[in-house]
């Protein structure tokens, strides 16, 4: 059977599975999924053509005439400028195109994909092998921070979501935007959905609020810089950056919206939030929204049921929001009449984690809309964040790392949550440099 016939039958079977088991809003296709192709071999040990072998361009037999890599990996034949132009044109004409979705999907480093193994977790030997593989992956993360004495920007990650390196680096780390959600995951189905989206990029299309945020982020950054220069010091400057890590916590990473600098003063973090709210929403729609928010670990994905979004003046949010919206809003006015960020909100978790990684003391939260803009100062709270950092690192170790190796949630199976002791994970340890150890 030729490769095209195999692809056709596999696609048909996958489409049936998607139709029966996947939410209709989920952007899932076979072409966006990492897959392996069979080659000659006996039934007990069938041959598999992995991505690494495919990239060597060696002849793999008559069956192999189809690139098994996900869509996002198939751009190595064109320049970044050509790809960017193509994506911009496609975004304007067909913003919910599955092909566009998979072009923007994240990148799992090939070193991880090629180490994918099948283990019998009902045996002690299988669990020990999994623990060794997990330790190797943690060692790899720590190894990338060798020679760094403090926070550093990962090379070639400027542009953030448009950078392949940015996707590859952040997918194995806990990120600030999902910190609170990750800490509060409890239900099995919610954990599965979160990991599928975080690691394997099975998610929903961008909603209107997300597209508005991306469109206005650069405008908000310029407006923030103008306010700082006019009201505080004309020498203030905002620098766009990529992905940042700290050798103390190689499992964590952040992508600031900007770093605020002024000669003679400590740098500050910039966090931008574009403010949009519902203009009108019926009671039935509100019930649907609440139900989805409960089942979906990322509340930002629940806005596709909303009637209409409109800009809200952040200085007058009390006048333009319903009582229910004000209760869930991330800002509040204190007794002195100053607008502050609610400490229990997910955005505070996001800011505290970024400040911790960057070792900064202050963040300027820029709340921007097309009708107004305010700057809210947020101070680093070490007492608030230390315990949460510890829990994030533990959950990353016990949940994310085993899932990267096993890929159970790709098949809607519950993830393996593994508690294991540290094994040659120090970046200065050369145990895993030996290929024999790495394959054990």
Image: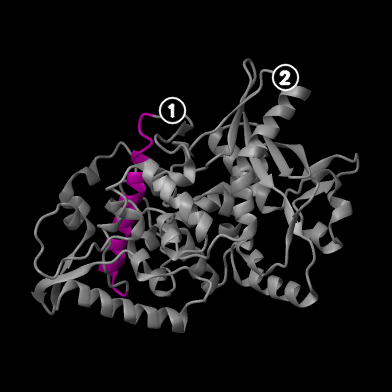
Q: Is residue 373 left or right of residue 77?
A: right
Q: Quadrant of residue 35?
A: bottom left
The percent coordinates of residue 423 (x first, y second) are: 32, 50
Above or below, comparing residue 78 to residue 284 in the picture:
above
Instruction: Give the magenta part as a residue range.
Output: 122-147
The answer to whether residue 199 shows anywhere in this view is no
The percent coordinates of residue 154 (x first, y second) are: 42, 36
Looking at the picture, tell me which residue is in the foreground, 237 or 381. Answer: 237
Looking at the picture, tell me which residue is in the foreground, 62 or 166. Answer: 62
Marks counted in the figure total: 2
Q: Residue at x 23, y 44 (%)?
A: 431
Which numbered circle lies on residue 17? none
Which residue of the protein is positioned furthest toward the top in this rendering? Answer: 264
Q: Is residue 341 magenta?
A: no
Dot 2, how many residues are within 10 Å of its Cα: few (below 14), some (14-19), or many (20+)? few
Q: Quadrant of residue 185?
A: bottom right
Which quarter of the image is occupied by the C terminus? bottom left
Which residue is tagged 1? Answer: 149
The residues bearing labels 1 and 2 have C-alpha atoms spaced at a distance of: 31 Å
The percent coordinates of residue 108 (x first, y second) are: 36, 54
Looking at the picture, tell me which residue is in the foreground, 254 or 208. Answer: 208
Mark 1 or 2, nearer chain start: 1
Looking at the picture, tell me which residue is in the foreground, 256 or 181. Answer: 256
Which numbered circle lies on residue 233? 2
Q: Quadrant of residue 356?
A: top right
């Amino acid at each position: 059977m030729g490769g095209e016939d195999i692809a056709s039958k596999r696609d048909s079977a996958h489409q049936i599975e998607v139709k029966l088991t996947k939410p209709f809003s989920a952007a899932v296709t076979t072409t966006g999924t990492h897959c392996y192709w069979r080659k000659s071999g006996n039934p007990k040990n069938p041959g598999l053509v992995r991505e690494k072998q495919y990239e060597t361009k060696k002849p793999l037999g008559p069956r192999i005439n189809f690139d098994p890599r996900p869509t996002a990996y198939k751009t190595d034949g064109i320049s970044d400028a050509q790809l960017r132009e193509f994506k911009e044109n496609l975004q304007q004409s067909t913003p919910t195109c599955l092909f566009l979705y998979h072009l923007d999907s994240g990148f799992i480093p090939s070193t991880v994909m090629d180490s994918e193994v099948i283990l019998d977790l009902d045996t002690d030997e299988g669990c020990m092998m999994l623990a060794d593989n997990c330790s190797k992956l943690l060692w790899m993360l720590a190894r990338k921070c060798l020679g760094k004495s403090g926070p550093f920007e990962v090379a070639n990650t400027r542009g953030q979501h448009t950078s392949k390196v940015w996707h590859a680096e952040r997918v194995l780390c806990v990120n600030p935007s999902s910190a609170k959600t990750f800490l509060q995951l409890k239900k099995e189905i919610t954990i599965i959905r979160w990991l599928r989206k975080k690691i394997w990029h099975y998610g929903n299309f961008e909603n209107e609020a997300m597209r508005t945020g991306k469109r206005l982020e650069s405008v908000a950054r310029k407006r923030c810089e103008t306010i700082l220069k006019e009201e505080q010091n004309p020498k203030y400057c905002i620098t766009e950056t990529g992905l940042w890590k700290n050798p103390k916590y190689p499992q964590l990473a952040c992508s600031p919206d900007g770093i605020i600098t002024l000669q003679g003063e400590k740098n500050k973090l910039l966090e931008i939030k574009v403010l949009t709210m519902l203009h009108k929403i019926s009671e039935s729609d509100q019930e649907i929204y609440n139900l989805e928010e409960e089942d979906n670990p990322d509340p930002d994905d629940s806005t596709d049921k909303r009637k209409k979004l409109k800009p809200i003046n952040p200085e007058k949010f009390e006048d333009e929001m319903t009582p229910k919206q004000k209760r869930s809003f991330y800002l509040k006015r204190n007794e002195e009449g100053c607008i502050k960020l609610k400490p229990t909100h997910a955005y505070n978790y996001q800011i505290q984690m970024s400040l911790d990684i960057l070792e900064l003391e202050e963040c300027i939260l820029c709340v921007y809309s097309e009708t107004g803009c305010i700057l809210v100062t947020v101070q680093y709270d070490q007492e608030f964040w230390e315990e949460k950092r510890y829990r994030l690192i533990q959950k990353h170790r016990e949940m994310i790392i085993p899932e990267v190796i096993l890929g159970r949630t790709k098949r809607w199976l519950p993830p393996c949550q593994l508690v294991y002791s540290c094994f040659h994970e120090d970046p200065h340890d050369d145990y895993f440099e030996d290929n024999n150890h790495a394959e054990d």
